[in-house]
Image: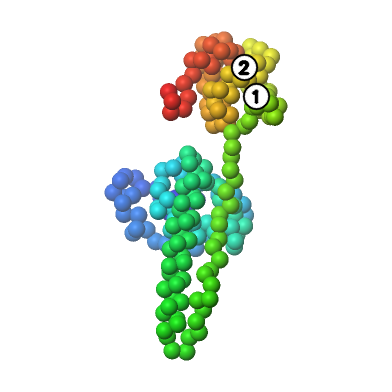
Amino acid sequence: MWEIACFLGLNPEPLNENELLRMRSYPDLTASVNYVLENALTRLLLVDDIQRVQPHQLAPVLHYFDYLRNRLGITTIFCGTGASDIVHEARAIADRHQVTVQRHLTRRATHSPGQQDTSQKDPAHSFLPITWLDPIPFNAQDKETWLQVLAGYEKHLSLHNLTKHALTEHHEYLHNRTGGYFLALSQLICQAATLAILTGTENITRTELDAIHIGRGH
């Protein structure tokens, strides 16, 4: 909530670590954030670098994202290394906590005079939608998709001396280098294009591609 408020300009970002540690002193901005999102007709909330948080840190706020989806129609997409695993684990923690709280309240109600026992069933768990982003295939069953992706990059590269099929002719090499993932492919092509501009070749060849290091393996 605090980060969303900062992004919307409702709360100034901390100037130093001490201000960050005092974040609890900031007022509850939930109502303000909801108001801005609703009036801006927000439909998509992108949470990037989700690998920077632990599942137990994410769990307490998952039900707020549920609220945004159910009440305001806002879809939340979590991005980052291992995003699906982090969200799944956080959801499991959040739902276990919800069930525990509900059972505690039910026991209290059951032992209170004049209250009915409502512990017949557990509350239905809500789940955030997760889209699994698999790498682009390049195999006997599907070779066209990867070639179409590379052709799309070629079409939008503004290099003066770019040869025809500069990327598609290296389709196997590029798939082996990137594993078929968009992020690695974009980094490789963009850095190779930058190198081509800096060296004056204005073209992408194996020389430029081989000179670029991407990913943790390098």
Between 202 and 10, the one lying in front of the other is 202
Q: Earlier in the sequence, mark 2 or mark 1?
A: 1
Q: Is residue 167 above or below residue 62?
A: above
Give the label on residue 170, or none.
2
Q: Quadrant of residue 196?
A: top right
Between 130 and 77, the one lying in front of the other is 130
Between 77 and 101, the one lying in front of the other is 101
- Residue at the far bottom: name it: 114
Number of other residues with Cα within 10 Å of mark 2, as a class: few under 14, some 14 to 19, many 20 or more? some
Element marked by disc 1 = helix
Give the label on residue 100, or none.
none
Q: Quadrant of residue 111?
A: bottom left
Tell me the amino acid under the disc marked 2. His
In this picture, residue 22 sits left or right of residue 143: left
- Residue at the far left: name it: 18
- The residue identified by callout 1 is 150
In front of the other: label 2 or label 1? Answer: 2
Q: Residue 212: where, in percent of width, then height?
A: 49, 19
Element marked by disc 2 = helix
Q: CA distance from mark 2 to mark 1?
A: 9 Å
Q: Residue 66: where, in percent of width, then height?
A: 54, 59
Q: Residue at x 70, y 29 (%)?
A: 141
In this picture, residue 144 sits left or right of residue 111: right
Q: Quadrant of the C terminus?
A: top left
Q: Residue at x 53, y 28 (%)?
A: 184
Q: Residue at x 40, y 53 (%)?
A: 56
Q: How many marks?
A: 2
Q: Is residue 6 above or below residue 121?
A: above
